[in-house]
Amino acid sequence: MAPLKRIVIVGGGTAGWMTAAALARLAGAGTTVTLVESEEIGTVGVGEATIPSLLDFNRYLGIDEDAFVRATGATFKLGIEFVGWGKAGGRYMHPFGTFGRDAAGIKFHQIWRRQAGLQAPLNDVGSLEDYCLAAVAARLGRFNRPTGDPAAVLSSLRYAFHFDAGLYAQFLRHLAEEGGVRRVEGRVTQVDLAPDNGFIDAIVLADGRRIEGDLFIDCSGFRALLLGDALGVPFVSWQKWLPCDRALAVPSTSSGAPVPYTRATTTEAGWRWRIPLQHRVGNGHVYCSAYMTDEAAADALLAGLDTLATSEPRQLRFTAGVREHLWERNCVAIGLAGGFLEPLESTSIHLIQSGITRLMSLFPDSGHAPIERDKYNRMLRRDYEQIRDFIILHYHANGRIDGDFWQQCRDTPPPDALVERLALWRERGRAMPEPGQLFSEDGWIAVLMGQIGLPQSYDPLVATLPPEEAARFLQHLRGVIGQTAAAMPAHDQFIASHCARPL
Ligand code: FAD
């Protein structure tokens, strides 16, 4: 079968320009890549926190990290601080990277758990977070890039970014256009389907221009113009587990030295985010309209700001869920056109990336083999469902004692896969993600520990480690991690000396 000649991307938000930048290498090799966007319609305009997988995407595009941080006003992110979610209502960190170091094939947190239950002084082990470099550095407001030396503790550091998603899209647009992608400004008003097989033949713009293609990427945002409207692929709602359906977003003035982590704080019927960039702070409130009015949500958002709002809050409406298929005939939906999961674990941009990389690994030719499409659909659905379950964990295992919203979240039975995970944690402290899952075992441990607390018992294999020896091992690790974090530069100093945004 012949290679595809014409790829058309509809939408120029983060999804559209990430896809265009990644496909730019096809442009010029006998294939045209065209991106259509409408400034009149605009983009969703939020999306500021990311996870470490973005580094792989940027590396794939050959992006110089300092240039990217400077251009997008980015700061470094070492994890997410969750406030008011867990049993004691307190706070915990979901840091990137790992907790401690496994010993004799036993997971580190199991050793820590056994020691924590012993008599003094053997139980003097601090918190689990004391054994994660990202968590300790985040609390100290420090940052450094990991070293390549695997023997150094600093090599274990994982990080991501907070950035201005609009500036990121502009940055990628530049790369994509340099790589040969053609941008067309205009509003799509019609989608022409082939009468014989229902494939998309062309899109038609408001001024009558007709753009034909062999493969269409739907990056049109919540509208899902191609996959939803034109091809009629139904939306599967996950609202029963994730009932929040609105968000208010508002930027505020810069807070001085930005902290290297996102903060997610529960409210009466949802949660607030706080994301520090170099030049401002991004704030928002995700809430459930069945339990909170828009006015109350705006009040809670504004009352929680620690700097001055620079505009009125902007509202966004959504339903958690995903399209039944993300690839249908000759159309693949990437970004909000494919599905939406609230930004509690900053995963939307990752899902865009996952859609792009999986599409590249199953790239069709003019035969449009159903087997590749079906594989793609299964993989993406699994990506969405695994992240969905991780987000549900935060809601279902919440420890807030006030309010019907939180009670409803506790009462709603979680998906089966999560039921087993919760039981494994409660009984034995086992986290064990499925192979290929985005969030690592340590990510699950952080959230399970933060939401539920200590498991009832621990891995019986820990008995093979004498308690005194384990105590020395823990003390040593904690010391080395603490010293490594303390020796890092302050986060704002690191930015100032490497990648400050021009004033
Ligand atoms: P959009 O930004 O909506 O872009 C759609 C594009 O399609 C636009 O260019 C528009 O002009 C174009 N278009 C639409 N209709 C037409 C038409 N008829 N003709 C021509 N062009 C058209 N993600 C994260 O990773 N981290 C976060 O912290 C985060 N926070 C979020 C908070 C909220 C409240 C929301 C709602 C989302 C958040 N996201 C976050 C998700 C993130 O914003 C999106 O995944 C990302 O911006 C991608 O959006 P998109 O490109 O799919 O859609």
Image: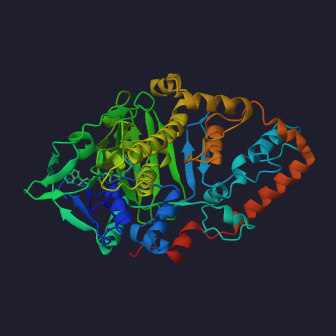
Write the residue at 62% across / 33% down. 421
Query: In the rendered view, how is the structure colored?
Result: rainbow
Residue name at image x 76 percent, y 54 percent: 101
Q: Can you say whether 11 is above or below 396 in the image? A: below
Q: Quadrant of the C terminus?
A: bottom left
Number of residue marks = 0
Horizontal and vertical percent position of residue 98: 67, 53
Which residue is painted at 51% across and 27% down in the image? 402
Task: Please state the horizontal and vertical placement of residue 335, each as a whole percent of the image.
Answer: 36, 50
The N terminus is located in which quarter? bottom left
- Front residue of this view, candidates 103 and 355: 355
Of the pair 292 and 95, the residue shown nearer to us: 95
- Asked which quadrant contains residue 198, the reply is top left
| Residue at 73% over, 46% down | 127
Residue 65 percent coordinates (x, y): 49, 71
In the image, residue 95 sits, relative to residue 395, either above or below, namely below
In the current view of this chain or complex, which residue is farthest to the left?
Answer: 208
Above or below: residue 448 compared with residue 280: above
* Horizontal side of residue 475 vs 90, given as left or right: right
Find residue 376 and report its horizontal and vertical position in percent.
Answer: 42, 46
Q: Is residue 393 left or right of residue 326?
A: right
| Residue 378 showing in the rendered view | yes
Q: Residue 397, can we see it?
A: no
Of residue 434 and residue 246, the one placed in the foreground of this image is 434
Q: For this view, does 306 lie left or right of residue 41?
A: right
